[in-house]
């Protein structure tokens, strides 16, 4: 394994979380993004990540509705997005899927777990966003973006998910990325483990709050006990660093903290 050669991809990485080099082959790169958004009236930072490989980009989660231009600007321009992998159905993760589908011109692969597939396809309602909340959120967007969102997540348009993921699947990216089913935050929530760099991407199965590694946010986790039980799968992994969609990177006593959280369930 060589250190990532960022210069091969055109200059400095847009955002390397401090001290967060990931060892990779020089023709591949994993980059954790730093997407600044406003959620519920508050400034927030989301951490989708992207893998560049063989001239293409694979995007893991897509930010909130209306954040497409910002997210797109964080990506290397010469790498068309060939795949979107969704950790789960929540709006702040699927938010710009409609624009990526449109940009892909029918060629985009969309990966998600069976447990959240119907929602992402638009044939079942979002688990947490009531119609009222959804309306309120969409009212802050341009009419075109709001319309695109409604259309893509509607039963009247073709399904969005092209590839259904299961626990134990290995995505052929960056030398292999393991899919870990971590239900509780949503039924089809997945986390991803990259053995090549010993990095665990938790989606919303965990979050980093003020430097502390935590379980999922209880208020947005309908089955919190199950969500904590799901963390048990992480104890079998050799983890050097964790990246949470909310809160970013964490180094430290990862297994110890996970054991604490599992024990509290
Ligand atoms: Zn989230």
Image (tube, helix red, strand yellow):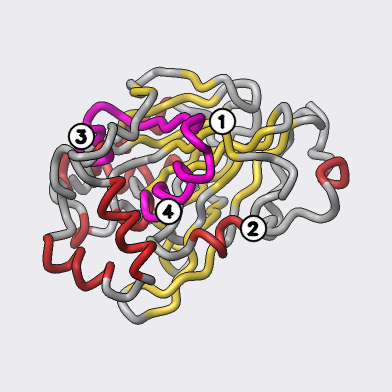
Who comes first in sequence, dot 4 or dot 3? 4
Label 1 residue SS: strand
**Is 22 on the left-hand or right-hand side of 188?**
right
Query: Is the residue marked by circle 3 packed among few (<14), some (14-19), or many (20+) residues within 10 Å?
Result: many
**For the magenta stretch, what is the residue range?**
94-120
Name the foreground residue: 254 vs 219. 219
Between label 1 and label 4, give the one nearer the viewer.
4
Q: Which of the 4 image quarters holds residue 148?
A: bottom left
- Number of the label disc, if any, that sits on residue 194: 1
Who comes first in sequence, dot 3 or dot 1? 3
Disc 4 designates what residue?
96
Disc 2 designates what residue?
74
Distance between the Cα atoms at labels 4 and 3? Answer: 17 Å
Pinpoint residue 186: horizontal percent, then vertical percent.
22, 43
Distance between the Cα atoms at labels 2 and 1? Answer: 22 Å
Name the foreground residue: 138 vs 251. 138
Pinpoint residue 189: horizontal percent, then vertical percent.
30, 38
Label 4 residue SS: loop
Between label 3 and label 1, give the one nearer the viewer.
3
Disc 3 designates what residue?
118
């Amino acid at each position: 394994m060589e250190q990532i050669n960022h210069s091969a991809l055109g200059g400095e990485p847009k955002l390397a979380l401090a001290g967060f080099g990931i060892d990779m082959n020089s023709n591949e790169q994993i980059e954790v993004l730093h997407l600044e958004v406003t959620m519920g009236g508050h400034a927030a930072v989301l951490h989708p990540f992207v893998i560049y490989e063989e001239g293409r980009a694979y995007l893991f989660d897509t930010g909130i509705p209306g954040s497409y231009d910002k997210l797109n600007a964080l990506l290397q321009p010469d790498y068309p997005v060939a795949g979107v992998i969704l950790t789960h159905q929540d709006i702040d993760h699927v938010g710009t899927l409609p624009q990526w589908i449109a940009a892909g011109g029918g060629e985009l692969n969309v990966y998600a777990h069976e447990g959240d597939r119907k929602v992402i396809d638009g044939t079942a309602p979002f688990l947490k966003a009531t119609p009222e909340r959804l309306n309120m959120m969409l009212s802050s967007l341009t009419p075109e973006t709001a319309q695109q969102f409604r259309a893509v997540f509607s039963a009247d348009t073709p399904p969005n998910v092209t590839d259904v993921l299961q626990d134990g699947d290995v995505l052929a990216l960056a030398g292999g990325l393991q899919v870990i089913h971590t239900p509780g935050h949503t039924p089809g929530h997945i986390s991803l483990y990259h053995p090549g760099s010993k990095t665990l991407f938790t989606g919303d199965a965990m979050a980093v709050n003020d430097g502390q590694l935590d379980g999922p946010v209880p208020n947005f986790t309908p089955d919190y006990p199950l969500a904590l039980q799901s963390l048990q799968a992480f104890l079998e992994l050799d983890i050097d660093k964790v990246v949470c969609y909310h809160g970013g990177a964490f180094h430290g006593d990862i297994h110890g903290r996970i054991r604490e959280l599992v024990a509290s369930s």
